[in-house]
Amino acid sequence: MTTTARPARHWAITTDGKQAQGEVLLNCITGSIGYIVGVTHRGMPLASRALRAITDYSDAELGLPRLILEIEPDNQPSIAVARSAGLVVTATQPETVTDKGRTYTLATWEHTPDPRTDTPTSIRPRAEPQPPTHQSRSRGQGLCTAPVHQLCRNGTLDRRSQGCGGPASFGCGPQQEDPSAASSNIPR
């Protein structure tokens, strides 16, 4: 029997493992990443920590040669997040796109693994037994066993269980309100 890995991975950004304050997405085929953080949760380092955890996860677990993030050149908060997570703007000519009647330009930012290291220093292997997986719904894909990832205050990815690559969580601080209104940087 042959199994195929899911092309996309989705994680919730949380501070308590329950209340979503944002989301991070990774397309495992194209290497495109995106994130969204609720309006009431901006200004905290939630997106930066989650993005660093995703780049570390990609380097250590997926071995993708490059991750990309597309950002509007005047989106200073997203540029600050990309820089803080170690991404750099590429020399690629910015792309002009029209989506839902809006035309805008996107610059490409990238992360490439450090060839001097095999495993990022922020991922700490756990020696103790892993807790059981939890059941979670993954965007229209039904019930699956999903990995539970939590990003600690110091920025390490705490890998608590294995699963389908569906929703998981990054915890980064005190609990906040629901992010019903949010701006996004989600890959197309």
Image: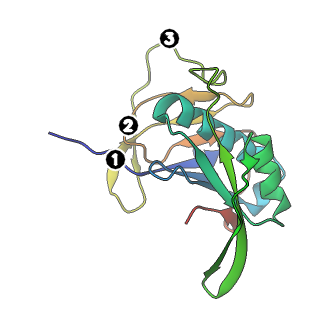
Q: Residue at x 48, y 31 (%)?
A: 61
**Disc 1 secondary structure class:** strand
Is 89 left, or right, of 132 in this rendering?
Answer: right
Q: Quadrant of residue 120?
A: top right
Identify the amino acid type marked 1: Cys
Q: Residue at x 41, y 54 (%)?
A: 138
Residue 63 place in picture, x, y as percent: 49, 34
Q: Which residue is mark 1?
A: 144
In 3D space, how far apart are the residues under numbered discs 3 and 1 (Cα atoms)? 25 Å
Depth check: give the residue in front, 138 or 116: 116
Residue 53 place in picture, x, y as percent: 63, 36
> Is there a contact, CB below 8 Å, between mark 2 and mark 1?
yes
Q: Residue at x 24, y 42 (%)?
A: 3
Please say whether residue 15 is visible from this viewpoint. no
Q: Which residue is mark 2?
A: 163
The residue carrying pointer 1 sits among few (fewer than 14), some (14 to 19) or many (20 or more) residues within 10 Å by Cα, namely: some
Q: Which mark is residue 127?
A: 3
The residue carrying pointer 3 sits among few (fewer than 14), some (14 to 19) or many (20 or more) residues within 10 Å by Cα, namely: few
From this view, report whether residue 124 is shown above or below residue 179. above
In the image as oriented, which residue stretches furthest toward the left?
Answer: 1
> Is there a contact, CB below 8 Å, between mark 3 and mark 1?
no
The residue carrying pointer 2 sits among few (fewer than 14), some (14 to 19) or many (20 or more) residues within 10 Å by Cα, namely: some
From this view, report whether residue 138 is shown above or below residue 151. below
**Disc 2 secondary structure class:** loop
